[in-house]
Image (cartoon, rainbow, N blue to C red):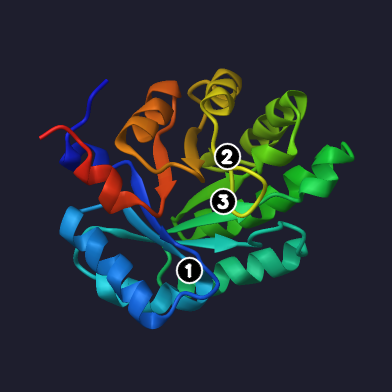
């Protein structure tokens, strides 16, 4: 598959999650998203209100992260964080699962954590993506995590935070697609830096890509 710059832009969440991000860096990210008509801008919760105001009436979504990047905050705090983010203008929320509970095979706890956030997000008619952090999981755990994300009624399962040992891998996206089928969508994130890498993820089954190198990737699209 080959996508034009305009087509590929609709797959991208233009991301600025660096802890050292300043207001100027956040504004630049929003400006680039508007220029290229990217699907969404993904920032830390502190910046949601600012970005939502910048994107008002552009048709571009404001995306934020919940329980990020470790996933080891309480379910109650994830729900409250989601509620505040929605109040500030978030359209899409990317939460991290409780990775330790997944690895301990406490599947009910993992589903309950996801479902509590999903209920909060869907009550406000927003979109929930769930990060399973594939770099820390075996293939069996990736498969089980995807099943639990479906059971928790999220809209997307997402590969990575971009803050662990590695990011998205084509093989992981293929495995995730095989597991979830058409039940939910897939977001690949972390380490995608070129048009070719972006297209490989889409060809593997990704519906959305989380990238900080959006401008470079889009400029690499066929003219």
Residue sitting farthest toward the left: 223
User: Closer to the observer: label 1 or label 3?
Assistant: 3
Mark 2 to mark 1 CA distance (whole Å):
23 Å
User: What residue do we see at 19% from left, 54% from top?
Assistant: 36
Q: Which mark is residue 159?
A: 2
The mark that comes first in sequence, 1 or 3, is 1
Residue 169 x %, y %? 55, 31
Residue 5 x %, y %? 18, 40
Q: Is residue 181 above or below residue 134?
A: above
Residue matched to label 3: 162
User: Closer to the observer: label 2 or label 1?
Assistant: 2
Which element carries disc 2, helix, strand or loop?
A: loop
Residue 155 x %, y %? 51, 41
Residue 213 x %, y %? 36, 51
Which element carries disc 1, helix, strand or loop?
A: helix
Q: Residues within 10 Å of mark 3 (few under 14, many from 20)?
A: many
Give the quadrant of the N terminus: top left
- Check whether the beta carbons of the residues at disc 1 and disc 3 lie within 8 A of each other: no
Q: Locate residue 141 relative to residue 213 in the image: left or right.
A: right
């Amino acid at each position: 598959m080959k996508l034009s710059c305009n087509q590929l832009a609709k797959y991208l969440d233009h991301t600025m999650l660096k802890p050292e991000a300043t207001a100027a860096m956040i504004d630049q990210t929003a400006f680039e998203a508007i220029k290229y008509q990217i699907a969404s801008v993904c920032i830390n919760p502190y910046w949601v209100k600012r970005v939502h105001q910048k994107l008002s009436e552009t048709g571009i979504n404001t995306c934020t992260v919940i329980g990020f990047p470790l996933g080891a905050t309480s379910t109650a705090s994830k729900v409250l964080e989601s509620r505040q983010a929605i109040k500030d203008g978030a359209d899409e929320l990317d939460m991290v699962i409780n990775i330790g509970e997944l690895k301990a095979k406490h599947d009910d706890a993992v589903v309950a954590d996801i479902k509590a956030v999903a209920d909060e997000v869907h009550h406000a008619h927003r979109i929930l993506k769930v990060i399973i952090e594939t770099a820390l999981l075996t293939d069996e755990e990736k498969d089980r995590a995807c099943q639990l994300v479906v059971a928790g009624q999220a809209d997307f399962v997402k590969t990575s935070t971009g803050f662990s040992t590695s990011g998205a891998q084509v093989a992981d996206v293929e495995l995730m697609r095989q597991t979830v089928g058409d039940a939910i969508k897939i977001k690949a994130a972390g380490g995608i830096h070129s048009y070719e890498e972006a297209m490989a993820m889409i060809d593997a089954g990704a519906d959305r890509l989380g990238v900080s190198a959006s401008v470079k990737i889009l400029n690499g699209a066929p003219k």
